Image (spheres, rainbow, N blue to C red):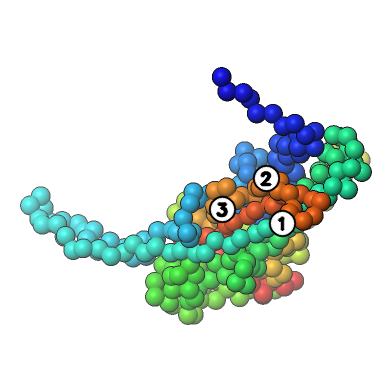
């Protein structure tokens, strides 16, 4: 009969148990640091963000099992065989169609490490002490990794970074190997009239007090196709304050009557939650549909720690935190942005 595996060294048992119980809670807490982290990096879609907002946690996250690249199929043109027929004996069109294109993007590789020296282990004698020390190491590396990815969700642009929303939401350029100049449907519409040539699409807004609400209406409509609409609006705190300032001023009283509240717990625009994020690019308001704009992770590398490894020539052991993923967009028409927003 097979013998159950046992860990003979107390430190090994402590590290294994601590990881099993600690890491899920650490991830949950670190993902709460920004809306981008909760929406695009978070795990549990049944959790809500920003004090009970609509269910968004993990809504902009996908996982792909295997594959050298992130790959997505798109229908970039209409099917020309679709027609109304003159009668029951009319002939149907069998013209071969070539409207499917596959876009692809490179995986981006994130890394961070926790390291314990033999001295750390000896000083922190006892399972509670070493667990506390490990908890600090784990929170530090996990928090740093989440912060790094949460910033890149918006502004990632270098060769080693994930592609940011600043680049994904655009027109007339090439994203994921598909050219907006070649395929008319592969463009966000900005604030321009529908069917505007890709090279002429403008996302530029201006004074929120003068034109912000009007531009928001246009931008939201341009990112809508029937019931497919943006479900979250992201900006930094300044732009959200501009929006809140346009709402009808009202002093509201909550029981007891001595408590006044001249603000709002939550802000929506056409039902989409407006969430402030310190990582968002200044002066930009993002209207995002998480059904088609998301971060895709490679299975097995979704903020996951690797087994502890002993160094060959040092009295230490190290565990690597690996993250491999990429920001993706299925349909650029369904997400939009306003740029150059000022007071």
Circle 1 is placed at which residue position? 112
Which tag, 3 or 1, sits closer to the chain's start?
1
Q: Which of 41 and 289 is in front in this view?
A: 41
* Front position among marks 3 and 1: 1
In this rendering, is residue 37 above or below 13?
below
Q: In which quarter of the image is the C terminus?
A: bottom right
Where residue 90 appears, x then y in whole percent?
9, 55
Residue under the image location 33 percent in, 65 percent down: 77
Q: Nearer the viewer, residue 321 or 235?
A: 321
Q: Is residue 59 visible?
A: no
In this rendering, is residue 98 above or below 3?
below
Q: Is residue 16 visible?
A: yes
Task: Name the side, left or right, on which 226 lies relative to 90.
Answer: right
Cα distance in 3D space between marks 2 and 3: 20 Å
Cα distance in 3D space between marks 3 and 1: 16 Å
Where residue 179 appears, x then y in whole percent?
44, 73
Residue neighbourhood size for the residue with mark 3, other residues' Cα within 10 Å, grouped as few (<14), some (14–19), many (≥20): many
Whether tag 2 and tag 1 are in contact, CB under 8 A, the answer is: no
Residue under the image location 67 percent in, 58 percent down: 111
**Secondary element at tag 2:** loop
Which tag, 2 or 1, sits closer to the chain's start?
1
Residue neighbourhood size for the residue with mark 2, other residues' Cα within 10 Å, grouped as few (<14), some (14–19), many (≥20): few
* Front position among marks 2 and 1: 2
Residue under the image location 57 percent in, 70 percent down: 167
Where residue 10 appears, x then y in whole percent?
80, 33
Circle 3 is placed at which residue position? 297
Residue neighbourhood size for the residue with mark 1, other residues' Cα within 10 Å, grouped as few (<14), some (14–19), many (≥20): some
> Which label is found at residue 307?
2
**Secondary element at tag 1:** strand
Q: Which of 170 and 257 is in front in this view?
A: 170
Residue under the image location 70 percent in, 40 percent down: 24
Task: Name the side, left or right, on which 258 lies relative to 205.
Answer: right
């Amino acid at each position: 009969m097979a013998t159950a595996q046992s860990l003979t060294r107390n430190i090994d048992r402590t590290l294994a148990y601590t990881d099993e119980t600690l890491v899920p809670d650490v991830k949950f807490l670190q993902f709460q640091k920004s809306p981008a982290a909760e929406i695009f990096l978070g795990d549990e879609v049944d959790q809500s963000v920003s004090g009970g907002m609509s269910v968004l946690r993990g809504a902009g996250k996908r996982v792909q099992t295997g594959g050298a690249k992130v790959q997505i199929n798109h229908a970039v043109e209409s099917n020309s065989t679709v027609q109304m027929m003159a009668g029951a004996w009319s002939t149907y069109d069998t013209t071969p169609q070539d409207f499917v294109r596959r876009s692809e993007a490179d995986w981006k590789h994130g890394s961070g490490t926790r390291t314990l020296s033999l001295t750390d282990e000896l000083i922190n004698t006892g399972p509670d002490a070493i667990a506390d020390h490990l908890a600090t190491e784990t929170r530090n590396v996990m928090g740093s990794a989440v912060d790094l990815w949460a910033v890149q969700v918006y502004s990632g642009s270098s060769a080693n970074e994930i592609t940011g929303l600043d680049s994904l939401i655009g027109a007339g350029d090439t994203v994921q190997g598909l050219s907006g100049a070649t395929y008319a449907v592969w463009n966000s519409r900005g604030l321009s009239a529908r069917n505007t040539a890709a090279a002429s699409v403008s996302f530029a807004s201006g004074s929120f007090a003068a034109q912000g609400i009007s531009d928001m209406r246009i931008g939201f409509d341009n990112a809508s196709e029937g019931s497919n609409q943006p479900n979250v609006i992201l900006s930094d705190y300044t732009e959200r304050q501009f929006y809140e300032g346009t709402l009808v001023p009202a002093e509201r009283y909550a029981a007891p009557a001595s408590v006044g509240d001249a603000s709002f717990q939550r802000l929506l625009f056409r039902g989409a939650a407006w969430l402030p994020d310190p990582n968002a690019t200044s002066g930009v308001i993002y209207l995002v549909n998480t059904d088609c704009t998301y971060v895709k992770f490679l299975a097995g590398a979704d903020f996951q720690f690797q087994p502890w490894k002993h160094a060959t020539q040092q009295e230490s052991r190290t565990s690597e935190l690996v993250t491999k993923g990429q920001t993706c967009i299925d349909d650029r028409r369904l997400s939009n942005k306003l740029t150059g927003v000022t007071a």
